[in-house]
Amino acid sequence: MSNAGVGSESRGRLRAVQLEIRKRVRGKDYAAGARLPSERDLSKEFGMPRVSVHECLVQLEAEGLIYRETNRGWYVSPPRFLYNPQSKGHFTLSAEQQGRHPHTRVIDKRVVAAPEQVAELLKLPAGTEMARIRRVRSIDGRPVLYVEHYYMPCVFPNLFEHDLSVSLTELYRDKYDFHYGRMRYQIIPTAVREAAARVLRLAVGSPALLVRRVNHERNGAVSDCDLEYWRHDAVLVEVEVDD
């Protein structure tokens, strides 16, 4: 048999395994959020080298059917979170309206020198002292979003004393009588860095979606910004524009 023939047969087997796993996922043999059998077990079941099984799973991951977590394995992807920038960033309310169960955990809160991209977004001198809140947000128990929120400490004094797991938009409104005017979004494909990778259970360098949001006061002045790192397989940006 020629090498071309061997390659064709191998590709055919790969497609067959992909079709079978895809069928099981879509047929609910594997429920949303359920862990798939290990690559080793699938290798034994299908009589294929583990590297070939891994290739099949990577292809299904690219389709959004499954996802992986570092040192934990492969899982069936639940429905993506619908992210609408026009909702003004209210994560908790948006998730609940979609019938999901959101949760927010505060990682830390401290005063830091503004990173270069934050200083650029807020048009501040590099190294300006800013308050930073880092949080991880989950949907149905799965971490999907790592957020860094930056603001001038003088704008929201003693903010660190409040419960920072709630919506900051509502906290600003209720405790400081502060109301946002407009928001500007930049949505950029990126590779996840270490801080985000750790809490999102991803390998460093995995694909992610970076949403940079700049918040403006009603008088037009820039007030604060967010750097949101989303698992790329967990979110769908959706905007509806009326005529």
Image: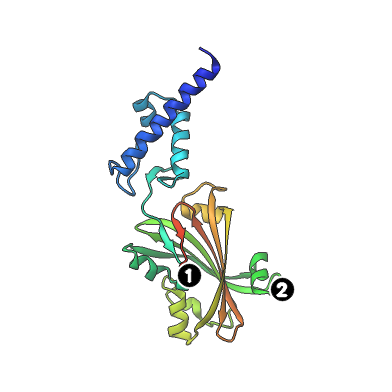
Please determine whether, in this image, residue 150 is positioned above or below residue 44.
below
- The residue positioned 34% from the left and 68% from the top of the image is 97
Disc marking residue 125: 2
Inspect the image, locate mark 1, and give the three-letter code of the amino acid beneath it.
Val
Whether residue 40 is visible here, answered yes or no, is no
- The residue positioned 45% from the left and 43% from the top of the image is 61
Inspect the image, locate mark 2, and give the three-letter code of the amino acid beneath it.
Pro
Task: Name which of mark 1 and mark 2 comes first in the sequence.
Answer: 2
Quadrant of residue 66 within the rendered picture: top left
Image coordinates for residue 182, horizontal then vertical, percent = 54, 78
Disc marking residue 203: none
Whether residue 104 is visible here, answered yes or no, is yes
Instruction: Decide: few, some or many residues near mark 2? Use Cα within 10 Å; few <14, some 14-19, many ≥20.
Output: few
At numbered mark 2, what does the secondary structure look like: helix, strand or loop?
loop
Image coordinates for residue 219, horizontal then vertical, percent = 59, 86
Image coordinates for residue 104, horizontal then vertical, percent = 41, 65
Relative horizontal placement of residue 90, taking residue 151 as reference (left or right): left
- The residue positioned 40% from the left and 34% from the top of the image is 18
Quadrant of residue 144 within the rendered picture: bottom left
Instruction: Decide: few, some or many residues near mark 1? Use Cα within 10 Å; few <14, some 14-19, many ≥20.
Output: few
The residue that mark 1 highlights is 241
At numbered mark 1, what does the secondary structure look like: helix, strand or loop?
loop
Please determine whether, in this image, residue 69 is positioned above or below residue 98.
above
Q: Residue furthest front?
A: 243
Please determine whether, in this image, residue 206 is positioned above or below residue 21.
below
